Image (cartoon, rainbow, N blue to C red):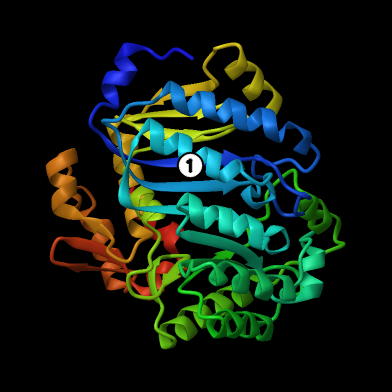
Amino acid sequence: MKHSSQFLRLINMKKVGIYVHFPFCVSKCKYCNFNSYADKNEFQQDYLRALVKEIQGYSDKSIVVNSIFIGGGTPSVMFDGCVSTLLSVIRSSFQVEDDAEVSIESNPNSITLTKVREWQEAGVNRVSIGLQTANNNSLRLLGRVHTRQDYINAVDIVRSVGITNINTDCLIGVPKQKLSNVKYMLALINKLKCPHISVYSLILEEDTELCRLVNSGAVKLPKESKTLGMYNFVLKYLREQGYDRYEVSNFAKPNMECKHNRNIWNMSEYLGFGAGAHSYFKGDRYSNVLSIEEYISLISSGKTPIDARETISKDEVLEETIMLGLRTREGINLSKMKEELDVDLNETKKDAIKYLIDNKFIEIDGDYLRATDLGFTVLNKVILELV
């Protein structure tokens, strides 16, 4: 596959993250609108071959990689040997730092000892397990194909090969969920000593089965006030257990934060490979075609799979810096914003900042403007005031 010399010059001597997308699943969850498919597993071998070609097309040993994130879909459903081949190609194509974070997403029912051993030997040092909820009835309602016990078994398998950096993905605000369910879920994860927990509020996405069920009245979501109560409990409980909220939905024990996600929230650059994968580099964004078949066909014929490309304007960079920065524990670095974007937020948003401080939604500490606990509960409102 050919790439312009101009593009290759752009990525010269850069330190980046890498994201690899595997769009395959055993089944499609009822709430999911990600680029994933449950009926195309016969394409796995051809897909890996296409991935290898795409990655090798960007091969440049002057590119330093500090994080690799293998997401999906469900990467853990890929055939044995897939992940080790992928990581070998990445390491031969780029300069991967010795202490690079290498993460892989997984579902509990598709984790096996054989696969986890392969991952560990290939250099994976962080595994994210999608529990979502510890209530088996809720799991079935969401279309999940695992049980609470499958999750417990998965954590044990991952830890048995020496991988201790484990994240658990959770959802709050799911149908029929009660605060008692959330308390039990967090207690279980804490008992299993997972050092990282991601807690997301369920978003009802259009064109999903869950959205149709809710719109028809067959299923009801908890009231917003109840979901907010769940989030406040999550924050209080996890703080008491030694987890720090370093981003609105992410909690970690000391030194166990996700480097890949931190890079994205800090507007660092990354290259994405695979169907539907996104890249961000030198102020430009790229996204690949969504279709597995089209992605494979384009790569096989020596064409680029990039479907869209845009240059991010200064105003867009400013908006994203504010939006992403406010999601994090540190907040927005005002001095850095003034230096790099020539914007003095204290001047351009003077009245909004005063209003937000007076109402205890934000605070300013030295060079940093950050959301308070109260501000995090109405974060979209805070962001809108400042962009």
Q: Is residue 171 left or right of residue 164?
A: right
The quarter holding residue 302 reads top right
Residue 236 at least partly seen? yes
Disc 1 crowd rating (10 Å Cα; few below 14, some 14-19, many 20+) is many
From what the image shows, is residue 146 above or below residue 229?
A: above
Q: Residue at x 20, y 55 (%)?
A: 333
- On screen, residue 64 versus residue 125, left or right, reads left
Query: Mark 1 sits on what residue?
Result: 87
Q: How far across and how far down the image is residue 112, in percent?
A: 68, 61
In the rendered image, residue 235, in percent from the top left (x then y), is placed at 46, 79
The image position of residue 207, as x and y in percent, is 75, 43
Above or below for 319 versus 164 = above
* In the displayed structure image, the side of residue 241 where residue 73 appears, left or right: right
Q: Residue at x 23, y 62 (%)?
A: 369
Residue at 53% x, 82% y: name it: 190
The answer to whether any part of residue 172 appears in the image is no
Local SS, label 1? helix
Give the answer, above or below, for where 172 lies relative to 345: below
Question: Exactly how many numbered labels are in the figure?
Answer: 1
Pick the front one: 56 or 186: 56
Question: In the drawing, does residue 65 fall left or right of residue 137?
Answer: left
What amino acid is at disc 1?
Leu
250, 209: nearer the viewer: 250
The percent coordinates of residue 248 (x first, y second) are 43, 65
Give the camera-side residue of 324 and 1: 1
